[in-house]
Image: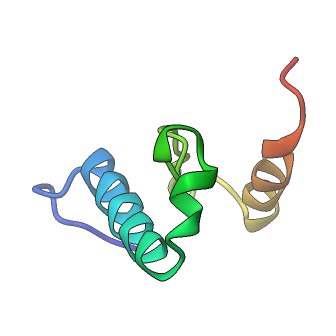
Amino acid sequence: MSATPQHTIPNIVKMLKGISARKLFLKFPQLKKKLWGGHLWNPSYFVSTVSDNTEAQVKKYIENQNAESV
C-alpha cells in the first residue's frame, strides 16, 4: 500500500476499519448484537515499512497477537 502525505496512516486505518465494519454489519446484521458495544475492530493497529521488517518478522508479530502480554 502507498499513500500521499495528505493521507495519514491513522486516517487510512480508520477508513479501512470503518468501511469493512459497515460492509460486514450489512451482510451479517447479527454480528452487531453479539459484539460488546457494537464495535468490530480494536482501536490499535501495527504499521511498519517493508525495509525495517522481514516477512517472517511480520508473520511472527501477527501470530503472537493472541499471546498473553508479559
Q: Position of residue 39 (x, y in %)?
A: 48, 46
Above or below residue 43? Residue 6 is: below
Above or below residue 33? Residue 68 is: above
Q: Quadrant of the N terminus?
A: bottom left
Q: Is residue 50 visible?
A: no
In the picture, measured across the screen, residue 51 lies left or right of residue 19, that is: right
Q: Is residue 46 visible?
A: yes
Q: How many marks?
A: 0
Seen as rendered, the residue at the extreme top is: 70
Figure quadrant of residue 64 = top right
Give me the residue at 76% from left, 54% from top: 62
In the picture, measured across the screen, residue 69 lies left or right of residue 20, that is: right
- Between 21 and 61, the residue placed more toward the observer is 21
Above or below residue 34? Residue 27 is: below
- Between 55 and 18, the residue placed more toward the observer is 18
How has the structure been colored for display? rainbow
Q: Quadrant of the C terminus?
A: top right
Q: Position of residue 4 (x, y in %)?
A: 17, 64
- Between 26 and 64, the residue placed more toward the observer is 26
Figure quadrant of residue 69 = top right
- Between 3 and 30, the residue placed more toward the observer is 30
Seen as rendered, the residue at the extreme bottom is: 27
Give me the residue at 25% from left, 67% from top: 3
In the picture, measured across the screen, residue 41 lies left or right of residue 19, that is: right
In the picture, measured across the screen, residue 57 lies left or right of residue 53, that is: right
Q: Position of residue 34 (x, y in %)?
A: 63, 52
Q: Position of residue 66 (x, y in %)?
A: 84, 43
